Image (cartoon, rainbow, N blue to C red):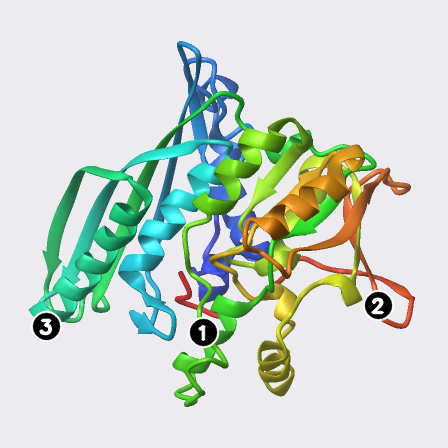
Amino acid sequence: MSLGTGRVTLAHGAGGRETWELLDRLILSKLDPGMKTALGGIGTDELDDGATLASVGGHLVLTVDAFTVSPPFFPGGDIGSLAAAGAINDVLMMGGRPVAVLDSVVAEEGLPLEDLDRVVSSFLRVLRSEGVSLIGGDLKVMPRGQVDGVLITAVGVGVADRPIVDSSLREGDVLIVSGPVGEHGAAILAAQRGIGVESEELRSDSRPLTGLMLPLLREHGDAVRAAVDPTRGGLAGVLNEWASKTGLTLVVDEARIPVREPVRSYADMLGVDPLTLACEGVALLGVDPGSADEVLEFVRDLGFPQASEIGEVRRSERGRGMVLLRSEAGGLRILEAPSGEIVPRIC
C-alpha cells in the first residue's frame, strides 16, 4: 500500500495511534506469514517488547531500540543510562534474564568529547551494575547539522525459560502497576519547555527493573500473564495495545493509579494527561486473579511500596478490545490510545 503524498510527522514517532498506523502501512502489511517468526520463536506476529528464538532448554530473547531523547541530560539520568536501562527492561518484560547488550552510537561533529564520554560512561555504569556484558557495537560521526547531538541504538540479549507475551492476558486477570506513572515524560517535558523545577519534584524514573522482574519471575512466574514497561504513549498507550491484541476490555480505576502530585499538577497545567506520559522505571503486569494479592504484596516487599492493583480484564461486549477508565466519581469512560505529538524526542 502506498503512503501517498503525505509526510512523516513527529506524531508518527510518539508511540500513539499514528505510530501503529505507520508501522502497519510501512512494514506489517507487507510481511509474508513466514517472515514474522524464526526458529520457532516469537516475532512480529506478537509485536511485543522484543522477540525470541527457540533454543535448547529455553528461548533466546532479543530486543532493539533507538534512543533520541532531547535534552540528552535531564533530571534523573541521561541518554546513556536511559538506553542501557531501556534495553534491559525490554528483555525483562519478555520474561528474560538480561545477559548482554550491543550498541550503536551516532555522534554529531562538534559534540564536546566530554559530553560523549559522559554518555558512554553512564551507559556502561548501568550495564556494570546489572551484570550485563557489552559484546559489540558501532560508532559513527555525522557532519554538523545532520544529527542532533548523539543518538544511541541498543540491542538487548537475554535468556528465558518461558517467554511472556501480552496476548496471554485472559479474562479475569488483575492489572498491577509497580509504581507512579508519568515520571519520565513529565521530567523531559519540563526540560524541553525550559522550566526550572526542584531536583526532587520532577525527575525521570529511568532505571533497570531487574530487581523487580527477576525475583518476581522466579517466585511467581506462573502467575504473570503479561508484562510491559509503559514508555512512549504511557499507561494509556500500553493498555490500549493490550486491549487491541486480545480483544478484551480492560477496566482501570483512576483513583488507584499512582501519580505523584508534582507530576499531576504539572500535567494539568499544560493540559496533558499523565496517563499518556512515558515511564522508564515502571512495570504494568497482568496477573492471575488467584495470585494477585500475593503478587502485589511481594512486589511491595521488593522495594516498590507504591505498587497498586489498578483494574481487571473483562470479556468484551462489543466484539473488540477497549479500555474503560472508572473516574473517581464512579463513572466510566473510554480511555483512548494517545494521539498527536505527546512529547517528542522523549526516549
Does residue 214 appear anywhere in the picture? yes
Q: Nearer the viewer, residue 179 or 242?
A: 179
Q: Nearer the viewer, residue 346 or 7?
A: 346
Per the image, the residue denoted by label 2 is 327
Badge 2 amino acid: Ser
Q: Nearer the viewer, mark 1 or mark 3?
A: 1
How packed mark 1 is, by other alpha carbons closer than 10 Å (few <14, some 14-19, many 20 or more), is: many
How packed mark 3 is, by other alpha carbons closer than 10 Å (few <14, some 14-19, many 20 or more), is: few
- Residue 245 position, x and y percent, is 67, 37
Q: Which residue: 72% across, 40% down?
A: 294
- Cα distance in 3D space between marks 1 and 2: 27 Å
Does residue 71 appear anywhere in the picture? no
Q: Where is the C terminus found, in terms of image quarters? A: bottom left
Badge 3 amino acid: Pro
* 82 to 287, vertically: above or below: below
Badge 1 amino acid: Arg
- Cα distance in 3D space between marks 1 and 3: 25 Å
In the rendered structure, which disc, 1 or 2, sits on the residue that comes first in sequence?
1
Per the image, the residue denoted by label 3 is 112
* 332 to 297, vertically: above or below: below
Per the image, the residue denoted by label 1 is 203
* 338 to 226, vertically: above or below: below
In the rendered structure, which disc, 1 or 3, sits on the residue that comes first in sequence?
3
Q: Quadrant of residue 132?
A: top left
